[in-house]
Image (cartoon, rainbow, N blue to C red):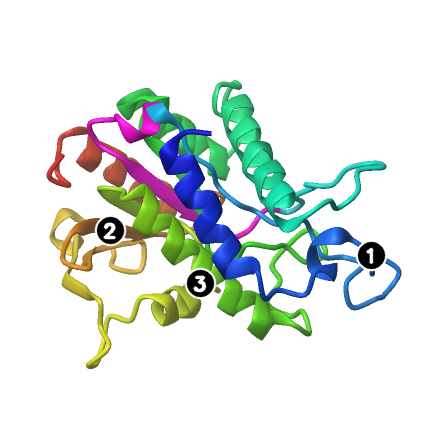
């Protein structure tokens, strides 16, 4: 395990050490409260990403299903689970990023477009929520407040360790308030500056806007990449062209 991967794993351990083990070991799958909880989404990293000239993190919403322990796999330890989760995510990303484009619109089509323009090694994949519930958003799950706290801490760890130059928040409107909770853009606790839109270029603010996180990371917010509306598609095309032309300072 290289140094960045090890740093991530250790940071994950610090966040997850207080999480009830049954969230991970599937020992309560017969309990309705936990039966539909997915495995944990934990991004890993690679030496090629660390050496990329420009690092782009794309933050989605959640995976519909994330199986870390499969079949007869047993929970051995938190350290072992973290390692398996990171490997699962890296393998999934490596597999799907190189597949042909999906029909219609999808999250991975956006990643593929970015990979075509900037190289696969430049991309990191993160999620606003680290678990899914019933193969979709966990926002209505009974234990969502705890999940939200864990997810926030994990995402902040990923940003701190992976140090992206650009973050694209592609989690959509329904969960925007949680992104704003993680990273306030108003009041004394604001960590966002240089808020701006592209209205003069014909792109509505509801479809695309930008800000700088911690005065360092250039960020963009778009609708979820599965959105099929003409305005959402146009905003994605505009953002891809903006990044391709070096508009984010790369």
Which numbered mark, 3 or 1, is in the foreground of this view?
1
Q: Which mark is residue 27?
A: 1
Report the side of 35 relative to 56 (left or right).
right
Q: Element under label 1? A: loop
Residue in the image at 56% along x and 74% along y: 145
Pointers 3 and 1 in contact (C-beta within 8 Å): no
Residue 192 appears at what percent x and percent y? 20, 64
Which numbered mark, 2 or 1, is in the foreground of this view?
1
Residue 30 found in image quarter? bottom right
Q: Residues within 10 Å of mark 3 (few under 14, many from 20)?
A: many
Q: CA distance from mark 2 to mark 3?
A: 17 Å
Residue at label 3? 152
Residue at label 2? 219
Residue in the image at 56% along x and 59% along y: 16
Q: Element under label 3? A: helix
Residue 173 appears at what percent x and percent y? 43, 62
Residue in the image at 42% along x and 55% along y: 155
Which numbered mark, 2 or 3, is in the foreground of this view?
3
Q: Nearer the viewer, residue 204 or 4?
A: 4
Task: Report if residue 63 is visible in the image.
Answer: yes
**Which range of residues does the magenta coloring cover?**
48-63
């Amino acid at each position: 395990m290289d140094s960045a991967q090890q740093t991530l794993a250790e940071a994950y351990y610090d966040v997850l050490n207080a999480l009830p083990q049954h969230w991970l070991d599937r020992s309560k799958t017969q309990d309705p409260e936990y039966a539909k909880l997915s495995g944990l989404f934990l991004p890993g990293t690679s030496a090629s990403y660390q050496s990329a000239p420009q690092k782009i993190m794309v933050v989605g919403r959640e995976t519909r299903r994330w199986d870390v322990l499969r079949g007869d796999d047993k929970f051995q330890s938190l350290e072992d689970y973290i390692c398996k989760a990171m490997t699962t995510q890296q393998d999934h990303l490596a597999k799907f990023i190189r597949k042909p484009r999906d029909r219609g619109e999808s999250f991975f089509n956006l990643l593929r477009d970015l990979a075509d323009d900037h190289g696969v090694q430049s991309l990191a994949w993160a999620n606003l929520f680290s678990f899914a519930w019933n193969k979709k958003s966990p926002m209505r799950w009974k234990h969502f407040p705890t999940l939200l706290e864990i997810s926030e801490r994990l995402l902040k760890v990923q940003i701190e360790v992976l140090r992206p130059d650009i973050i694209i928040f592609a989690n959509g409107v329904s969960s925007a308030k949680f992104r704003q909770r993680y990273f306030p853009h108003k009041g004394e606790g604001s960590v966002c500056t240089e808020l701006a839109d592209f209205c003069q270029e014909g792109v509505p603010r509801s479809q695309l806007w930008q800000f700088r996180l911690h005065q360092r990371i250039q960020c963009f917010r778009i609708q979820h990449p599965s959105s099929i509306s003409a305005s959402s598609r146009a905003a994605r095309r505009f953002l891809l062209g903006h990044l391709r032309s070096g508009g984010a300072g790369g």
